[in-house]
Image (cartoon, rainbow, N blue to C red):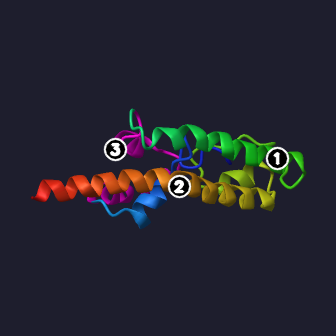
Amino acid sequence: MWVFIGGAGGTLGLVLLMVFKAKSKQLKTLGKTAILPAIFNINEPVIFGAPIVYNPYLIIPFIINPMVLASVAYFAIKIGFVGYVNTAIAWVLPVGVGARLGTGGNFPAVIIAFLNLLISVLIYYPFFKLYDNKLVKQEKGNKN
């Protein structure tokens, strides 16, 4: 609900960057393809399409992101801002919806979910930018 936003590694933030910030044709196309599944926490298109596996640019935020998001959620629960998860929910619910339902209707859970999505975007951004720039150079090199 708060950690695997977009699937393992919290990749919805990365997919949003691909859709709205990518300059390379490869990442822009992948982002458009992966956005709908990512909204429902299905991230195989981005994991294997980018690829994230064996990619030195994207594997680091893929590992760091869930640790940071889990810490934010933990402290939000610990200080009493967000209620405990008390309901089993389907893992395919979009960001915010699962958090609200899983906490029995706790609205601050939605806020933490979207805050974590923003944090995910910020964590992925510098790594995404490096990778996107590399792909842009490769695409320009292939045209000559």
Instruction: Residue at 45% x, 55% y: name it.
Output: 15
Pinpoint residue 9: horizontal percent, then vertical percent.
Answer: 55, 41
Image check: 76 left or right of 56? right
Majority secondary structure of the magenta segment?
helix
Asked if marks 2 and 3 touch (Cβ < 8 Å), the reply is no
Disc number placed over residue 49 in the picture, else none: 3
**Could you give the CA–CA distance between mark 1 and mark 3, rounded to whole angstroms?**
34 Å
Front-most of residues 88 and 7: 7
Q: Is residue 87 visible?
A: yes
The kind of residue on which mark 1 rests is: Phe
Task: Give the quarter of the image for residue 26.
Answer: bottom left
The vertical placement of 84 against 126, above or below, is above
Specify few, some or many for label 1: CA neighbours under 10 Å numbering under 14, 14-19, or 20 or more.
few
Q: Label 2: state its secondary structure.
A: helix
Please determine whether, in this image, residue 93 is positioned above or below residue 115.
Answer: above
Query: Mark 1 or 3 closer to N-term?
Result: 3
Query: Does the magenta portion include 42?
Result: yes
The magenta span reads: 25-53
* Residue where numbered disc 2 is placed: 13
Percent coordinates x, y for residue 95 in the rendering: 62, 55
Q: Tell me the residue that label 1 is attached to.
A: 75
